[in-house]
Amino acid sequence: MSEVTRSLLQRWGASFRRGADFDSWGQLVEAIDEYQILARHLQKEAQAQHNNSEFTEEQKKTIGKIATCLELRSAALQSTQSQEEFKLEDLKKLEPILKNILTYNKEFPFDVQPVPLRKILAPGEEENLEFEEDEEEGGAGAGSPDSFPARVPGTLLPRLPSEPGMTLLTIRIEKIGLKDAGQCIDPYITVSVKDLNGIDLTPVQDTPVASRKEDTYVHFNVDIELQKHVEKLTKGAAIFFEFKHYKPKKRFTSTKCFAFMEMDEIKPGPIVIELYKKPTDFKRKKLQLLTKKPLYLHLHQTLHKE
């Protein structure tokens, strides 16, 4: 085993233990972050094409399966459903496999498959890979077309069935105001509903790539169907909107800014909400406005009640 591989396995092991410790202590947000970051690193190695890797194709497949299990545990921590969860004791069975990956030759204990490497960074990872950008500045980039190719289909979900006395919410994302709107490549918005601890209360949804841009606006004009009746949302919950765009030089999708709407702002009609600097602060404790300019996220809400 080379020194590089030994060091890599030690880093993976330390990350795995940190995530499991956070998990066992009930620090779920920190555990999710650690699991997602490690899963991404494992996915990257599992799909690496370079010739100097010490891992065989079979070992890479096992590494990819461990990454899948990390994502399953992360999803279980964010889920409000209790059935079919991937449990912490299941995950802990994988630590010796990861540690001894070069000699492990048994059947993998869970029926999972490696998942494709996503170009979306896990929470906190982006800040390790790039310098903070000054959102107030930024050069005049090369000219780019006024419309975007619709190559990202999005993951929008249909409206829930109505229930007597219960309210459903449709949020139309109309446009977002950005000083450098014309320079954003393949922009889309990730919508999530979080509690005060940053835990997901509903499935996360991605819009398709924006329909067009005009001056300082990126236009979406898409409807988001909230995947929970408004009355069932926990006290202190908020709806988050993360604006993401592709960075060709770094070859990953980055969060540029975010906005959120709290429960007392749910009312029919138009609303504009402020934009904040990344990283996304789901706990809403250290918020910094993106700009002093009058640029906002423009939404329109429709309430449905039987």
Image (cartoon, rainbow, N blue to C red):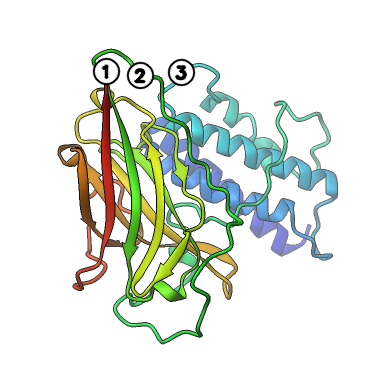
The residue wearing badge 2 is 162
Give the amino acid type for the residue marked by disc 3 in the picture: Ser
Q: Are marks 2 and 1 in contact (CB under 8 Å)?
A: yes
Q: Bin the neighbour count of mark 2 within 10 Å (Cα to Cα): few under 14, some 14-19, many 20 and up.
A: few
Q: Which quadrant: the C terminus?
A: top left
Q: Marks 2/3: CA distance?
A: 23 Å
Residue furthest to the top: 164
Residue position marked by numbered label 1 in the rendering:
306
State the residue in front, 280 or 102: 280
Q: Nearer the viewer, residue 40 or 216?
A: 216
Q: Earlier in the sequence, mark 3 or mark 1?
A: 3
For the N terminus, give its image quadrant: bottom right
Helix, strand or loop at label 1? It is loop
86 to the left or right of 50: left
Q: Is residue 79 above or below residue 211?
A: above
Give x and y (percent) for residue 101.
Answer: 75, 43
Q: Are marks 2 and 3 in contact (CB under 8 Å)?
A: no
Name the amino acid type tagged 1: Glu
Return the residue at label 3: 82
Of the residues tagged 2 and 3, which is closer to the observer? 2
